[in-house]
Image (cartoon, rainbow, N blue to C red):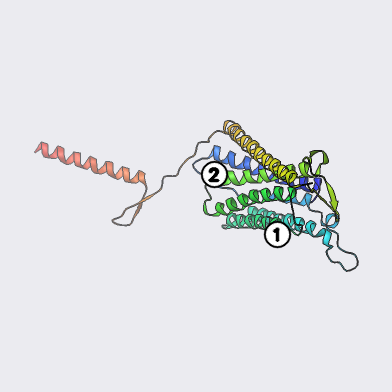
Amino acid sequence: MGTLVGHVAPGFGFLIIGLWQLFNHIKLYCQRPKSYPLPHHDGRLDLHTNGALYRPSRHQPLDPTDWTIPSNHLHNFEHATISFTIFTYAAFALHFDRVRLRAGGTLSFLLGALAFAVELLLFYLHSTDHAGVEWQYHWLLQVVISVSLITTVMGIGFPTSFTVGFVRSLSTVFQGVWFNVLGIMLYTPRFIPKGCSLQSDDGRLVVPCDDHLALHRAKALVNLQFAWSLIAVVAFSMWFYFYLAKKYPELAEYECLAEKVDQEDGIWKSPKIEEENHDSFADVGKWLKLKDLER
């Protein structure tokens, strides 16, 4: 990353994946609110999206003399590791969808949590020490990733919770939005805050500020951008829910009558048979009463 394209490209990837998940969650819940299952990620979409963004030979070149990783490309390898982790998760999730294993959904959630955990760890322990305005953008990004990680883990224990699935999908959408905001506002010269400038440092772009007052103002602007972006994403998600609720109304769900067991003799009986037996006993009682009257 470290460039406009390096942030916007993965941002669009997260945005597409998050919107697809949000669509599936809302549609399933609107059509079957009583039997709503929490679906795991769509492995095909994740696989294709991350495969299109993962280009190690171009963005992560090795030193041709000894095939080591150059110091100025460490951050590139870290970002590629994040993409590769998501790519690995998507491949297994796609396989679980095909073979239909009993624990496939749980394992998919575990792999998804691992992908978010690796992303959070590498952004927190970044080889490039983000400072100033960059640090503020990346710190807020870690907050969003933490929400994605927590809700993915919660999906294992609450597989039928619409709220968990909705928030997880929304956090993925917001990751994509914030990546785009970060790339555009931080690496476009015309959008650099007053008192700060875009400079090149050891092959990567940095945004130093002239003094503490300019840095404080720039961080405040970043916080405002985060709040405005969050409000916009939440407002869109509410509209998206209303729209899909009208387009996909609730479907009629049929429940199978469970068989009841006779506690006395341990024989399984259906409600229909039990009702018939009850009626037959009632008829016998009426017949005995008529006999008594005749006498």
Residue at left offset 64%, top offset 52%: 97
Q: Residue 197 location in percent, x, y? A: 82, 45
Q: Nearer the viewer, mark 2 or mark 1?
A: 1
Residue at left offset 50%, top offset 36%: 252
Q: Which residue is mark 1?
A: 125
Q: Nearer the viewer, residue 73 or 12?
A: 73
Where disc 1 sits, the SS reads: loop
User: Is residue 12 among the parts visible in the rendering?
Assistant: no
Q: Which residue is mark 2?
A: 163
Q: Residue 182 location in percent, x, y? A: 74, 44
Where disc 2 sits, the SS reads: helix
Q: Residue 167 location in percent, x, y? A: 59, 44
Q: Nearer the viewer, residue 102 or 210?
A: 210
Q: Quadrant of the C terminus?
A: top left
Residue at left offset 34%, top offset 55%: 267
- At label 2, the amino acid type is Thr
- At label 1, the amino acid type is Leu
Q: Judge whether 118 appears above or below 20 on screen.
A: below
Label 2, label 1: how many angstroms apart (C-alpha)?
31 Å
